[in-house]
Each structure stands twice: as structure tokens, then as C-alpha cells.
Image: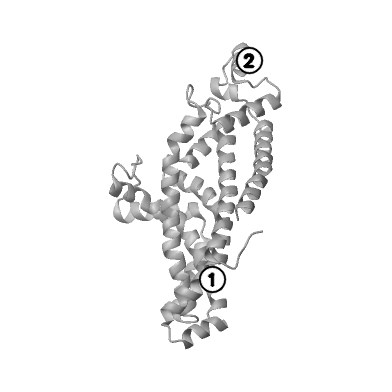
Amino acid sequence: MKQYIARRLLMAVPTLIGVSLIIFVIMAIMPGDVALARLGEAANPETLQMVRDQLGLNDPWYQRYGRWVKDMITLGDLGESVFRQGVSVASLIEEHFPVTLNLAVYTMIVAILLGVPLGTLSAVRHNSWIDYFLRVFSIVGLSVPVFWLGIMIILAQVTWFGWAPAVQWVSPFDDFWDNMKRMFWPAITLGYFQVAFIARMTRSSLLDILYEDYMRTARAKGLRERTVTIRHGLRNAVIPVITVGALQLIALLGGVVVTERVFNLPGWGTLLVSGVFNRDYALVQTLVFIFAAVVVVGNLITDMFYAWLDPRIRYQ
């Protein structure tokens, strides 16, 4: 297992290098001028040239790429933000990280606490009205766009209850209940798709296992149906759920961007959109690289969970 993890970590290095090169090239060939975005259309050519020199935009691409990679490895300042002059990209990312982490944690809690039980209930009550209702619930969740659902939730609450999203985010360590009120609907909006997906996968996987020979043997030994389903069935059924659930991490990261914009949350998603609008290349390429690194690490953690859940799985 240790050799497998070490090998996977070594494989992640060229993957991340390739991702960083692709991100850097895309940002380099995008139309627009960072210096012009900072100074405005009325700036004279001499001032524009001076700002380009200060930002290193006139240096060869390999020097700019090397500086960026070095800052990523050494956790440097990662360059200066365009739309917030005098503020480093690293400090902006650090400042907005708690909001995105807060939303992601609440979303995963909603997805796990609702998705697995609903999928299990749907499988156990196969072809009943509960199963049909939960299947429709899941199909709707997989079909509805996140941004549309968020907008509908805001419009419904504003129209019916006079509620509006709070302007300022509050840390859960400062005021937990105020934070819960602020993050509840964004977490529901982003988590609905995850709940629907996990519920569908859990139902499908559990249905394949409920009538296996070892499940019949467990029932013949006199074990209660709940014990047979949870201890013997669900533990094996959840393995493919974790596999696909890890892939949904990409969808979760994309949903964070949209949800934060809809609910006006000052997280990485809002920061990324602002960076794109302001041609803040250093900020955008760093955030996209972080998202890619999270996906690579998430896949590795998923593989490690396999061996813990199923002792038959061994990595050579």
C-alpha cells in the first residue's frame, strides 16, 4: 500500500506539471492586456510600457512560467493582483478560502447525510411509491441547473417571506448560527445535485447486492433485515458510490463558482469570476491550478478508501 501511494504521488507530479503548462499557455494567449486593464484606456504608451516591465510581462514566457512555478512550490506571493493593487495573489486566495471551504463542507454533509439514506431507502422499498417518488426526486436534481435553482430559491423567499441573502459572510467560529442561516440555502442549492447523484448510485449498487448469496446466508442466520442491509449490503454497495462521488468533486468545484456568485458569497468562485473579468491572469491561473490539484489529491484519497472499505482490495 505504501509503495502504491508513493507511486501515485510520483505520477501526480507530471500530471500537475502538464496542467500548469496548459493553464499558463491558455492565460498567455487570451486576448487583453493586464497593464491596460490596470491603468485604463486613457493610459499613455510610456506608462503602459513601465507597468509591463514592473509586472514582468515583457520577459520571455519560460521566465514568467518559472517564476510562477517557483512561487507555487515555495508558497510565495504568486504575483500582484491587478484589480486590488498592492495586494498579493496569495493573500487574496488565503482571505477568500474560508468561505469556499465552509460551503464545500456543508455541501458534502448535505450530500452524504441525505444521499446515502435516500438511496438505501429507495433500494429497500424497490418498486414502491417511496421508490418512485425518490427516483423522480433524483431525476429532477440531476436535471436542474445549479444557478437556476439558486435564483428560484432567492426569488421564492424574497416574494413569499421578504427574505434576502445576507450581505456579509460570518465565520462559524464567530457566530455559528448566523453562519448556518447564511450558508443553509447555498449548501442546499449546491448539494441537491450531489444528493440526487449519490442517491441514484446507492440505489443501483445496493439493488445488485441485496439478493446475493451471502445476503441470503446472513438472513438465514437470523440477522435482522436492517443489520443485513447496513452491515453486509451497504458496506459493499458504497464502494462504487465513492468512486463516482469522487469524480463529482469536479462538478462540486464548478458549482461553487456559480453558487457563490448567485448568493453573493466572497469565496474562491467569486474571486475567480472577478479575476477573469479584470484580466487578473496571475490570480486566475493560480486558482485553476489549485482546483486541478484538489482533483488529483481527491482521486488518490479515494483509492486509499477502497482498501479500508473492502479488505479484498490490495494494491501491489
Q: Which residue is mark 2?
A: 49
Q: Which mark is residue 236?
A: 1
Rendered-image quadrant of the C terminus: bottom right
With 95 as the anchor, is 300 left or right in this view? right
- Residue 280 seen in render: no
Residue 42: percent from left, percent from top = 56, 17
First-in-chain label (1 vs 2): 2
In whole angstroms, how far apart are the C-alphas of marks 1 and 2?
63 Å
Disc 1 secondary structure class? helix
Residue 268: percent from left, percent from top = 48, 40
Rendered-image quadrant of the N terminus: bottom right
Residue 146: percent from left, percent from top = 49, 54
Q: Nearer the viewer, residue 52 or 172?
A: 172
Amino acid on which the number 2 mark rests in the picture: Gln
- Residue 116 seen in render: yes
Amino acid on which the number 1 mark rests in the picture: Asn
Q: Nearer the viewer, residue 90 or 309?
A: 309
Labels 1, 2: front one:
1
With 201 as the anchor, is 263 left or right in this view? left
Residue 151: percent from left, percent from top = 44, 51
